[in-house]
């Protein structure tokens, strides 16, 4: 075993990892990366098929990000945001506000920069303030605390702010963020530490009890037969809270796709409907775009045509948005949803450094203003809040995202992924293939006809990912769902290798291939 692997075994405790399993084999020790490729201590190369746990956007060792960091290092790495402002954090905050309000300046084909046509701009002028933190959990913790205190200050100190979030939700691992989540396996051990939040069903079409459609070799969002019962459930929850005299303080959601819940995509129109309902019942909207932000949910528009969508006629704003797809960097914007809190992390620095941001509106900020002795201050923050290196990486990453080359690369990658994923439907152990933009979840089942799930103890997802690693492709499953989320620089050939490795791994681990015709 390599010396570094031995040291790891001796001393490092890995996150979300059964360390007994970990200690049974030599770990892959990563030493370098370039583009979508990671290299280990033995010189072996792997494709980074989950963008290093959903963080990397433009690829590893990107010359522009490297240069921006070197430039910043030449000035200073860090000074405190407690008492001081700094250059990159100020610039990044301004840029994030601009983007979150749909004013991202797009690079023209000739490289010059022009303001996005304001006729099509998403008008979300509410988000004006940025609170920096360190990762997704802390970004959500900030949103939670601000929403809680804002509600108490606006509804009265006796009010008891309560939150509504989605079944299976994961919003991070700090105690507040855990309370917002609903993954029993992760969280039940800490029940005693948590506060109560309510949950409402997420639109998991593939396993929805209200979906009357028979299993088919197609995306369950498209084939589903239902009456939007999931939307009705949100309405019922909000109505019940109102009846109790305690409207929800906030509705917390991941827009377009729930990540750690198992890559659960939302049918077109769901997000707009439920957020309208929640807002109509006085709830603030907290969009957790830790995974979905920064273009992850695609360009070519993942919104699928749903026959009964006209029940909520598309507003002019929605059709305007349709014309601006290439500029949509936040999933909420795809359905014209303007959240009151926007939590960003992971891709904020292009996946280079731990940095996060919680954006909110002026009214929230104003609720914390007062004379010193009123102690209305937001008493929250960390040593590395507003870190210069992170902010410099963030600025460089946003610059890349806005460039025509990135827009083109993302559109191509989305198409490549869509094309390659089709081959997986021929596997009897693939129950659902769900893609939203540049993210895909492939749900493994015992038999696609019955949708019978593997028991977690069978480690089906883990074993398939191990077999993929043997083929030079690295990713991590969520239970029985294998995630593909490549960096934006991934080539068509690399996508083919990623999907090919998954295909072969499923065959190797779970059984023989059944041709599509036989599977029908
Ligand atoms: C949607 C979402 N929110 C929050 C988090 C927590 O982020 P972090 O792991 O950076 O704390 C995650 C992590 O996967 C996430 O997917």
Image (tube, rainbow, N blue to C red):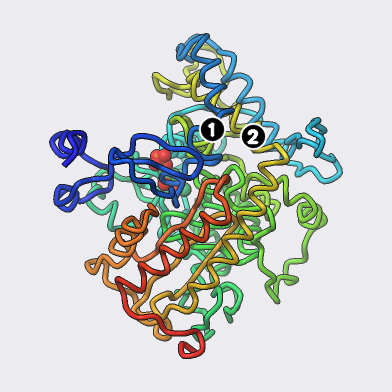
In this rendering, does residue 367 appear at all? yes
Q: What residue is drawn where x is 29% and y is 67%?
A: 460
Cα distance, mark 1 to mark 2?
A: 10 Å
Marks 1 and 2, the one that precedes in the sequence:
1
Q: Which mark is residue 400?
A: 2
Dot 1: element: loop
Q: Position of residue 428 (x, y in %)?
A: 41, 81
Report whether the residue tagged 2 is closer than 8 Å to ligand 1: no
For disc 1, the marked residue is 62
107 to 274, vertically: above or below: above
Q: Where is residue 420 in the image (x, y as percent from the top left)?
A: 55, 66
Quarter of the rendering containing residue 137: top left
User: Looking at the image, which residue sits at the far front?
Assistant: 43
Dot 2: element: helix
Quarter of the rendering containing residue 160: top left
The reply to whether callout 1 and callout 2 are in contact (CB within 8 Å) is yes
């Amino acid at each position: 075993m390599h010396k570094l692997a031995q040291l790891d075994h001796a001393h490092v405790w890995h996150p979300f990892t059964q360390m007994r399993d970990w200690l049974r084999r030599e770990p892959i020790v990563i030493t370098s990366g370039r583009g979508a490729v990671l290299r280990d201590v033995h010189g072996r190369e792997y494709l980074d098929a989950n963008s290093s746990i959903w963080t990397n956007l433009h690829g590893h060792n990107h010359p522009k990000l490297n240069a921006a960091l070197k430039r910043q290092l030449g000035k200073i790495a860090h000074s405190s945001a407690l008492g001081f402002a700094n250059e990159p954090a100020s610039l990044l905050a301004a840029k994030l506000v601009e983007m979150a309000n749909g004013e991202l300046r797009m690079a023209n084909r000739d490289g010059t920069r022009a303001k996005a046509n304001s006729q099509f701009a998403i008008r979300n002028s509410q988000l004006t303030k940025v609170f920096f933190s360190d990762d997704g959990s802390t970004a959500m913790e900030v949103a939670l605390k601000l929403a809680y205190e804002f509600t108490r200050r606006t509804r009265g100190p006796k009010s008891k702010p309560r939150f509504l979030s989605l079944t299976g939700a994961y919003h991070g691992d700090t105690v507040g963020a855990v309370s917002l989540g609903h993954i029993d396996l992760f969280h039940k051990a800490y029940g005693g530490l948590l506060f109560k939040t309510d949950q409402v069903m997420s639109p998991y079409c593939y396993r929805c009890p209200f979906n009357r459609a028979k299993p088919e070799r197609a995306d369950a969002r498209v084939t589903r037969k239902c009456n939007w019962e999931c939307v009705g459930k949100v309405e019922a929850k909000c109505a019940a809270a109102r009846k109790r005299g305690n409207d929800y303080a906030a509705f917390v959601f991941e827009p377009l796709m729930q990540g750690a819940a198992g890559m659960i995509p939302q049918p077109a129109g769901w997000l707009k409907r439920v957020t309208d309902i929640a807002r109509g019942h006085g709830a603030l909207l907290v969009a957790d775009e830790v995974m979905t932000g920064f273009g992850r949910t695609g360009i070519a528009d993942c919104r699928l045509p749903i026959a009964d969508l006209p029940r909520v006629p598309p507003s002019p704003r929605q059709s305007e948005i349709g014309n601006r797809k290439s500029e949509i960097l936040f999933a909420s914007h795809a359905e014209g949803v303007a959240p009151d809190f926007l939590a960003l992390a992971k891709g904020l620095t292009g996946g280079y450094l731990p940095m996060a941001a919680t954006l909110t509106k002026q009214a929230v900020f104003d609720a914390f203003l007062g004379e010193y002795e009123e102690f209305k201050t937001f008493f929250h923050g960390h040593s590395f809040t507003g870190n210069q290196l992170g902010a410099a990486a963030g600025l460089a990453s946003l610059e890349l995202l806005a460039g025509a080359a990135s827009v083109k690369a993302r559109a191509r990658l989305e198409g490549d992924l869509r094309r390659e994923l089709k081959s997986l439907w021929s596997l009897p152990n693939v129950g659902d293939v769900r893609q939203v933009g540049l993210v895909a979840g492939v749900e493994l089942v015992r038999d696609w006809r019955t949708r019978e799930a593997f028991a977690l103890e069978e480690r089906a997802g883990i074993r398939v990912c191990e077999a993929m690693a043997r083929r030079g492709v690295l990713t991590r499953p969520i239970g029985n769902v294998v995630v593909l989320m490549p960096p934006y620089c991934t080539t068509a050939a690399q996508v083919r290798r990623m999907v090919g490795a998954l295909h072969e791994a499923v065959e190797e681990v779970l059984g023989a291939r059944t041709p599509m015709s036989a599977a029908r």
